[in-house]
Image: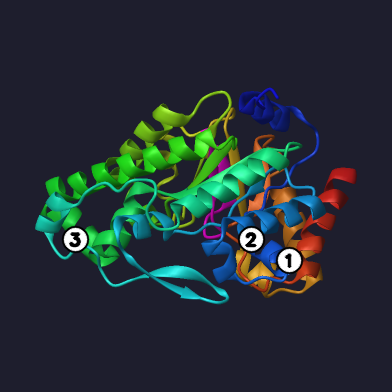
């Protein structure tokens, strides 16, 4: 089977009259198959089953895996807390000081749950052939913050930038190797979640995030595999730093003005976002979801590179009727 050209996929989206949607959601699929979050993040088969269930039900432009920002930290040795119906979280601090950074080894790709995530991607790439499948990974600055502690890494970049840079190099190298392995599964790209970089100024975001992501992009992105950079911490102050990575697409959180973000994204790159996953998708009524979706579509209609999406991963227990309302509103807008 010939590989899907992602360059053509992007061009087709930009050229078509209708707007397409790619919400970041897996949790509704987990609930559809009668499993819980812990099941899905520890078992690649369950994870895949959830992805496939959503793919079969909704007309998404692409399928996405869970946005789990603990997989890579666990591979390095971080302790992870697993709860039945919540996304896993890193507990404690793996690296106690700068000396620990020097001795930190880049782990092999058989550590922690990496193999289960590769399994989910292999299964999805094999059976979902009518649309792209996008894997997920964490960004280098966000990973460094989970290993060193977020407050501490923020201090370290000013107190000892050389040590911070050393840690970021190690994080970026592991992510690059992981993305290479994900690419080998046959998926069409990866959504790289770098929310912690939103804590930085545009200049610092470039120095401590974008330059490392750019190196990863240059290693793995090609006509058949793209990087979608997600930064829900960006309120508009570091969009330029995001674009400096050279990623093929950019995914924005609900804290940003989507129209202002679109002004800074190159016309040949996709810009995705950004309905609030909690206050809209999970907590609003179906009618409120409909109105919010239509309002965003109306506001962004001048930008053909816009892809309708959630601002981040839709959380567990998001009502099915709200997801239905989201897609119904998209259909309403496209048929108007």
* Residue 262: in magenta span: yes
Mark 1 and mark 2 in contact? Answer it, CB < 8 Å.
yes
Please rate how many residues cluster around mark 2, counting C-alpha atoms within 10 Å: few if below 14, some from 14 to 19, many from 20.
many
Name the residue: 67% across, 68% down. Answer: 280
* Residue 214 x/y as whole percent: 37, 33
Crowd tier of the residue under label 3, counting other residues whose Cα lies within 10 Å: few below 14, some 14–19, many 20 or above: few
| CA–CA distance in space, label 3 to label 1 | 44 Å
CB under 8 Å between callouts 3 and 2? no
Which sits in the foreground, 151 or 144?
144
Residue 219, horizontal then vertical, whole percent: 40, 28
Q: Is residue 320 above or below residue 116?
A: below
Compared to residue 29, the image places residue 188 above or below, namely above
**Residue occupied by mark 2:** 46
Mark 3 lies on residue:
155
Circle 1 Cα neighbour tier, 10 Å, few/some/many (<14 / 14–19 / ≥20): some
- Quote the CA–CA distance across marks 3 and 2: 40 Å
Report the Cα–Cα distance between label 1 and label 2.
9 Å
51 sits left or right of 118 in the view: right
- Say the numbered circle drawn on residue 108: none
Where does label 1 land, which residue? 33
> In this image, 249 relative to 325: left or right?
left
Residue 198 appears in the figure: yes
Q: Earlier in the sequence, mark 1 or mark 2?
A: 1
The range drawn in magenta is 248-263
């Amino acid at each position: 089977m010939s590989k899907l050209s992602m360059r053509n996929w992007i061009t087709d989206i930009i050229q078509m009259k209708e707007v397409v949607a790619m919400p970041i959601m897996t949790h509704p699929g987990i609930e559809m198959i009668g499993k819980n979050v812990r099941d899905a993040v520890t078992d690649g088969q369950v994870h895949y089953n959830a992805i496939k269930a959503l793919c079969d039900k909704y007309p998404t432009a692409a399928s996405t895996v869970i946005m789990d920002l603990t997989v890579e930290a666990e591979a390095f040795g971080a302790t992870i807390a697993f709860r039945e119906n919540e996304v896993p979280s890193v507990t404690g601090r793996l690296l106690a000081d700068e000396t620990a950074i020097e001795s930190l080894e880049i782990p092999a790709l058989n550590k922690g749950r990496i193999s289960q995530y590769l399994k989910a991607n292999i299964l999805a790439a094999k059976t979902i052939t009518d649309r792209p499948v996008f894997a997920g990974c964490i960004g280098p600055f966000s990973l460094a913050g989970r290993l060193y502690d977020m407050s501490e890494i923020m201090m370290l970049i000013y107190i000892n930038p050389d040590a911070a840079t050393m840690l970021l190099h190690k994080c970026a190298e592991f992510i690059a190797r992981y993305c290479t392995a994900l690419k080998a599964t046959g998926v069409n790209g990866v959504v790289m979640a770098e929310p912690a970089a939103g804590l930085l100024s545009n200049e610092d975001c470039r120095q401590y995030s974008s330059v490392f992501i750019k190196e990863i992009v240059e290693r793995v992105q090609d006509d058949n595999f793209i990087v979608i950079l997600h930064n829900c911490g960006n309120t508009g102050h570091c969009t330029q730093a995001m674009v400096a990575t050279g990623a093929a697409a950019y995914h924005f959180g609900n804290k940003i003005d989507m129209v202002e973000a679109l002004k800074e994204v190159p016309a040949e790159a996709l810009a995705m976002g950004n309905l609030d996953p909690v206050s809209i998708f999970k907590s609003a009524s179906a009618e409120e979801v409909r109105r919010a979706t239509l309002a965003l579509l109306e506001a962004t209609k001048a930008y053909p590179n816009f892809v309708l999406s959630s601002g981040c991963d839709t959380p567990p227990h998001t009502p099915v009727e709200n997801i239905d309302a989201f897609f119904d509103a998209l259909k309403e807008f496209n048929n108007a």
